Image (tube, rainbow, N blue to C red):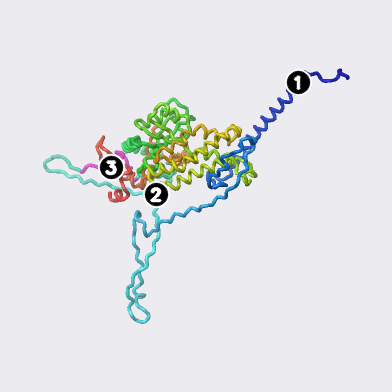
Amino acid sequence: MDTKHSPSSSSIEALQSANEHLELQLIELKAKLAWYEEQYRLFKHKQFGAASERYEGQGLLFNEAEAEAIEDEEPTEEDESQTQIVSTHTRKKKTARQSLKDNTTLARSVDTIDLAECDKLCGCGLQRFPMGEEISYKLKVVPAQAEIIEIHRPKYGCSCEDGIKIAPMPKMPIPKSIATAELLAWIITSKYCDGLPLYRLGFIAKRMGVEIARATMADWMIRSALLLERVYLALVARMVEQTALQADETPIQVLDEPERNPQSKSCMWVYRTTGMQGSPVILYDYQTGRGHEHPDAFLQGFKGYLQCDGMSAYKALSEKRQSIRLVGCMAHLRRKFKEALDAMPKKDQQAKKISRSEQALNMIRNLYAIEQRIKDKSEGERYRARQEESKPVLDKLKQWLDKQQALVPPKSLLGKAITYGQNQWPYLVRYLESGLLDIDNNAAERAIKPFVIGRKNWLFAHSVKGARASAILYSLVETAKANGLEPYAWLTYVLKQLPEMEAGSSVEHLLPMNLTPADISKA
């Protein structure tokens, strides 16, 4: 045997080692490629696809076969062989539009269109006689109109030279200002309810025949907020007495903050009561950051459940204050599985097999179906239904998460959704403990949307005073809306009442939950 050119054992081992290294590199590159392809598909869906998180699903009811996931299948495979369950689609009933005939909130005027006298004489020569009338209803809208109010105060004197007597000026929301309660309420409602920035309101006012500088309106908003702060603080006191709250937060840029550059991001926090606690309260709080010290300061005296997302600040808060028990948000978990489903290749999404993402979404969908069925029940009935119906589904979902965690790459979207579910599980199932709690934090997310929509128009706040004023005014507008009051009418009423009240007197009678539209219209 010629051993001169035969490879040595050391060179063979070196080649084998190099081959193993290349194979590992290939696996890593394939994993990176799969991750980038997944991110690209998700980006395309977010850019061009439907923004809704709605999921019809391939199975309406939880399939027992889905609980027995095949543990030895390849981690890179997304689909599993499952029997498809065809879901029945329930069409939502359209809400009937309220007829103008039955509307009791709008002012009415009556126009009578009668026959001409000559037409009341019949061709036969007899006089026509009345026999009822036909009524039709039309809607008329009068755009905002500016009106100048002249306040005349006659002066009275006496020959005894006792001096001149004149009636005192009525107290105004902003002393020595031309702004009436109606004007301030219009600006507040337009900006903080309808999302119109002040410069647009300036254009609208100019079309009405009056010029109001944007800086003047901004100053009015700050001074209005200072006047209305008494009502805001009364709502804060009412809120912290509740046993269950929800919280969320969103960034805000404030240009002129002490010792901070204009590019720094501050935070607008929102807190609200849950839907089962009667009269809703929705409050905003401007702060310079997202640390746990901010909700800690705002919620002084609060003891109970706080429903929120998985942000670390909330966890730090609950660790500091044992009296606060965190409740997770099932919508966040559903959103992550929906993103994983949207990022799948189209051929896999359209396959008849039910993917892992769809399995999780089907189980979560069952939980929401239960909530939909019991939403109008009492607190006790909701608690019992969750123990009897929701808990078994949650137990199966937890078993499924435990099995899948070892099978799915942790850096994939599906892997991140599973990890999120595992990390948040103690908080996600806590809504079972009370019928006062919601399954998700969507109410708080909806409460913060008006601010987010407004921010798209005005982009940033100029000063800390402006940001704090925005927090107060958004709070009052949203709480009024949630309690069934028209914000403009309620603000006008309150802005007229407050200047006449003594400092330190109770404002409980002015709170939105203590008034009805009829009370305001009478005033």
Q: Which residue is mark 2?
A: 208
Disc sitting over residue 13 in the figure = 1
Residue type highlighted by circle 1: Glu
Residue 377 position (above or below residue 262): below
| Element marked by disc 3 | helix
Does the magenta-highlighted stretch encompass residue 500? no
What's drawn in magenta, residue-wise?
167-182
State the residue at coordinates (65%, 35%): 74
Tell me which label, 1 or 3, sits earlier in the chain.
Answer: 1
Q: Which residue is mark 3?
A: 509
Eye-nearest disc, 3 or 2: 3
State the residue at coordinates (30%, 40%): 173
Residue type highlighted by circle 2: Met
Q: CA distance from mark 1 to mark 3?
A: 87 Å
Q: CA distance from mark 3 to mark 2?
A: 35 Å
Q: CA distance from mark 1 to mark 2?
A: 89 Å
